[in-house]
Amino acid sequence: MSAICFCTSAQGVDIYRWVDDDGHVHFSDKAPARSSQPVTRMDSRQFEVSRERRREAEKRAAHDRERSAEVADRIERERAQQYSSGSQPGNAASSAAASPPPANDCAVMLRRFQESSECLAPFMNVNGSFKPNAFETCGPPVPYPAQECSR
């Protein structure tokens, strides 16, 4: 019972806002001991997400996870087909990213860029480099076709 009371009391916490003598704005759950400027109390409940919006966000997240799983399954099936046909996924000849799209077909180039980016995203490190098996899994990165599509 105390855990329920604790969780309920954690929501709707008062937030205090004030400007110090140097003009810096501060926010805290505790009012300053002293301040030469007025301290404004704000109720944090106005920032809480409604149950309906939370459900919508959870539904979108579940849909995104399903879509990601579908894409991963499709990629895995394509790789299995490549191996069964004798071509290797790392070869330029078998890589969809390496085969040139029809001349100046921006829609195709943008789609390939997006697919490449989505595949490589989980392999990207914080510093922008890629984890070791990124290119074996996704093939080489497809550059953004800005120059080709701006003509």
Image (tube, helix red, strand yellow):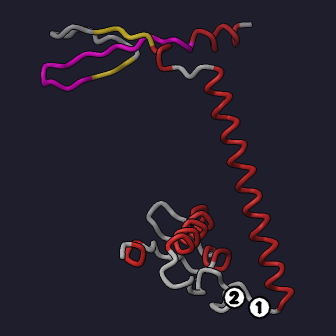
Q: Is residue 19 magenta?
A: yes
Residue occupying the point 24% across, 24% down: 25
Left or right, 145 with respect to 5, comes to left
Of residues 30 and 137, the one nearer the viewer is 137
Crowd tier of the residue under label 2, counting other residues whose Cα lies within 10 Å: few below 14, some 14–19, many 20 or above: some
Q: Secondary structure at mark 2?
A: loop
Rendered image quadrant of residue 115: bottom right
Left or right, 5 with respect to 149, comes to right
Q: Is residue 12 magenta?
A: yes
**Amino acid under disc 1:** Ser
Q: Are marks 1 and 2 in contact (CB under 8 Å)?
A: yes
Question: Residue 134 placed where, x, y %?
Answer: 61, 73
Residue 53, compared with residue 72, is above or below; it is above
Residue occupying the point 45% across, 66% down: 128
Q: Which residues are magenta?
A: 10-25
* Residue identifier under label 1: 87
**Amino acid under disc 2:** Ser
The Cα–Cα distance between marks 1 and 2, rounded to whole angstroms, is 6 Å
Rendered image quadrant of residue 14: top left
Of residues 104 and 110, the one nearer the viewer is 104
Q: Which mark is residue 94?
A: 2
| Quarter that holds the N terminus | top right
